[in-house]
């Protein structure tokens, strides 16, 4: 089965006749479906086809958004105003579509009061519950308490 460059079916013709038609038009004969009976071939400019496919792939790649993990570092003794600024930055990161990793760092004697750091993470979780989803619950890893959140999927997208 042969399909010409205007997507019309020419029917079943011999290979030599198909190659002759392709060379008369100055284009290529491309086998589309080799497993069909009879095989399906199309008369087209293969270089132009590959170029268009490459352009489509490039445009699709340009439209993709690379998700990054932004870090917001806190301490158990972080003041309320500083916390609000960190929270505002986290909201901005979430609006941009990035993930936010909250880290509460403990130093020295602060290790004895790790519940204070976990309270900060739980407070951040409650403050951002409207626009985020918890990906990793608050947990303690060494001298840090860590929590990862991501933006909720928007209905319009």
Image (cartoon, grey):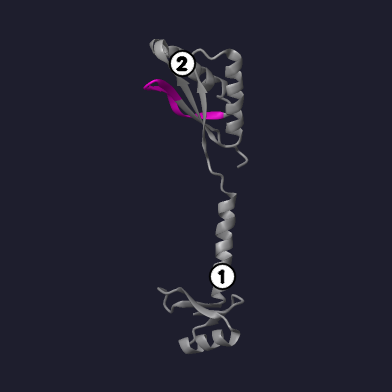
Q: Earlier in the sequence, mark 2 or mark 1?
A: 1
Q: Residue at x 55, y 29 (%)?
A: 132
Region in magenta: 132-146
Mark sitting on residue 59: none
CA neighbours of label 2 inside 10 A, class few (<14), some (14 to 19), many (20+): many
17 left or right of 6 in image: left
Q: Indicate whether residue 31 is drawn in magenta.
A: no
Q: Secondary structure at mark 2?
A: helix
Picture coordinates of residue 95, whole percent (x, y): 61, 33
Q: Indicate whether residue 143 is drawn in magenta.
A: yes
The CA span between labels 2 and 1 is: 58 Å
Which is nearer the eye, 64 or 6? 64
Picture coordinates of residue 78, whole percent (x, y): 53, 15
CA neighbours of label 1 inside 10 A, class few (<14), some (14 to 19), many (20+): few
140 left or right of 102 in image: left
Q: Quadrant of residue 146?
A: top left
**Residue at image mark 2:** 117
**Residue at image mark 1:** 49
Q: Residue at x 36, y 22 (%)?
A: 142
Q: Is residue 56 above or below residue 84?
A: below
Picture coordinates of residue 19, whole percent (x, y): 51, 86
């Amino acid at each position: 089965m042969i399909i010409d460059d205007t997507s019309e079916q020419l029917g079943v013709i011999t290979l030599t006749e198909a190659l002759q038609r392709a060379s008369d038009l100055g284009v290529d004969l491309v086998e589309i479906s080799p497993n069909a009976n009879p095989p399906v071939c199309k008369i087209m400019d293969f270089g132009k086809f590959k170029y268009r496919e490459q352009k489509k792939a490039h445009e699709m790649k340009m439209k993709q958004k690379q998700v990054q993990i932004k870090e917001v570092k806190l301490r158990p003794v972080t003041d309320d105003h500083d916390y609000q600024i960190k929270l505002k930055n986290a909201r901005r990161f979430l609006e941009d579509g990035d993930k936010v990793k909250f880290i509460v760092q403990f130093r020295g004697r602060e290790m004895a009061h790790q519940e204070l750091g976990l309270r900060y993470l739980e407070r951040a979780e409650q403050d951002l519950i409207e626009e985020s989803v918890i990906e990793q619950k608050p947990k303690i890893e060494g001298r840090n308490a860590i929590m990862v959140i991501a933006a909720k999927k928007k209905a319009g997208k």
